[in-house]
Image: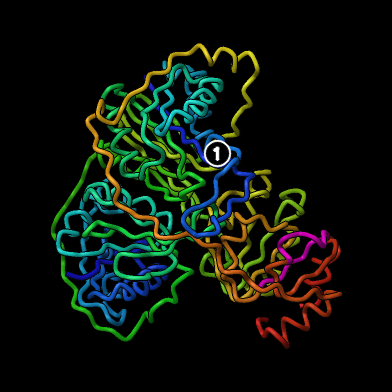
Amino acid sequence: MKVLVAVKRVVDYNVKVRAKADGSDVDLNNVKMSINPFCEIAVEEAVRLKEAGVATEVIAVSIGDKACQEQIRTALALGADRGIQVETDGPVEPLVVAKLLKGVVEKEEPQLVILGKQSIDGDNNQTGQMLGALAGMAQGTFASEVKVDGDQVQVTREVDGGLQTVSLKLPAIVTTDLRLNEPRYASLPNIMKAKKKQLDVYSPADLGVEVKQHLTLVKVEPPAERQAGIKVESVDELVDKLKNEAKVI
Amino acid sequence: MGTLVVAEHDNATLNPATLNAVAAAQALGADIDILVAGNGCAAVGEAAAKVPGVGKVLVADNAAYDHALAENTSLLVAELAAGYDNVVAAATTSGKNVMPRVAALLDVAQISDIISVEAADTFKRPIYAGNVIATVQTADAKKVITVRATAFDPVAAEGGSAAVEAVDAVHDAGVSSFVGEELAQSDRPELTAAPVVISGGRGMQNGDNFKLLDGIADKLGAAIGASRAAVDAGFVPNDMQVGQTGKIVAPELYIAVGISGAIQHLAGMKDSKVIVAINKDEDAPIFQVADYGLVADLFEALPELEGKL
């Protein structure tokens, strides 16, 4: 079966992002960009399915300007077979991403679509679920275990109280949580090989999707600062402060 | 037309995060109804009817809505949304699972994890792991919103007497089914609802050492959490993770042990009333947000603290 895996180009997770002085947006000048960590877990899971003989082909798709081809190449170096870029002018909203992915799903007809549960820039946690609704597919979000069994996939999900397991009819959607797997590092030979792998570029029009903006970013600002308190010298002083000053114990 | 709040529950009790979502709905200014979709969930409908300020409670009681399967529940919510301006749910794992499907079915954007309502169409929400707060305005007439529960004080659970109405619509997409669940068995309070939370980080060194937190948690009636670093290192399961990609908590007292204070973690706990940090590195960023900081080796400080409580 074919597996489609979506990857997003985001600010590297080690970068501390700040608001621009005029509050118009975040300052992304000259910062390191990487594949979204949850998407990396998605690629790893797809590649493992292929190594286990469950998947026959892994296709990595990304949506954005030309720069996101770098993240597609990363996915190809990790083991994806070919790539698709849907070219847009910069970032688009999750609903539009979901519509574009639905277009790719219609072209490629994968049995499984694996995405990160959220991207670490917008922190929206929407795209996989939206794609599920648009494509009429079942979803296993926040997955910590994925088991394909015939025409079903069993997904164990990280939920607030613990774990929940659901059974989904294929084709289905999986969004990854942290514990699903530990992504491998790409080897140098694989990075070189990835450069030669097929990468197709589509426009939103090719997929019959109109790129529409629903949300306007009014401003960005740093979060409210919390005042630093005091340092206590001993456990005794700490217990005393909590009892008599803060009165929380 | 009003606001529909999608209740979270387990067919027996109303999850308190729903009361925070109702508080956010009040800030939107419109009339509020609550939807209880489940299987054998009449008791939850009655509980929701007692929430003050609610017009009516819609109860959709059918096997298709058991365990809030997203495929089925989203079809129901999207249908009912025709009669409302806003659809609101708490940004719990259940709300996050269901609501984006609702938004997509309605062809509108979802505004995720809001921390304030600035106007009926304008909201604040944290982005970039909480490094930045964005103010966003939506052009959609119908709004689908998830609410960061800790940012809104809950409304009272009792005092109202809303009418309860049965909803007969049954939507079964027939593509998903519930297999089982493994809920953490603990005598301790649930992390997001606990009055006291004690969390361990990478400084705990291994999973076994988390036992050092047990005695203190027992004495304080606390829930035990962890930083993402501790989860990544495999010390403890992910359901203990406090942070932007884990659970958001705001207890009366938060004790961070061996946690350096990455912004990812701070985003999940900085609304706590009192923060205590215990760390041997006096320059750890956690001390910048702690009300009381103790620079100490946690392996000495924890047993001593347990003894003195």
In the drawing, does residue A89 fall left or right of residue B59? right
The residue drawn where x is 62% and y is 50% is: A16
Q: Of B11 and A233, which appears nearest the observer?
A: A233
Q: Of B191 and A163, which appears nearest the observer?
A: B191
The residue drawn where x is 27% and y is 22% is: A107
> Given the current orientation, which residue lies at the most extreme front position?
A22
Q: Of B269 and A10, which appears nearest the observer?
A: A10
Q: Is residue B298 visible?
A: no
Q: Which residues are magenta?
A: B275-287
Q: Is residue B305 visible?
A: yes
Helix, strand or loop under label 1: helix
Q: Quadrant of the N terminus of chain B?
A: bottom left
Where is residue B157? Give x, y as percent: 37, 79
Q: Of A43 and B92, which appears nearest the observer?
A: A43
Q: Quadrant of residue A100?
A: top left
Where is residue A127? Give x, y as percent: 37, 42
For label 1, count other residues whose C-alpha is less than 10 Å away and answer few (under 14), some (14-19) or many (20+): many
* Above or below, B115 relative to B185: below
The residue drawn where x is 19% and y is 64% is: B84
Q: Quadrant of residue B298?
A: bottom right
Where is residue B101? Give x, y as percent: 29, 48
The residue drawn where x is 33% and y is 70% is: B119
- The amino acid pointed to by label 1 is Pro
Q: Quadrant of the C terminus of chain B?
A: bottom right
Residue A213, magenta (yes or no): no
Q: Quadrant of residue A37?
A: top right
Give me the chain letter of mark 1. A
Q: Which residue is mark 1?
A: A37
Residue B280, magenta (yes or no): yes
Total marks in image: 1
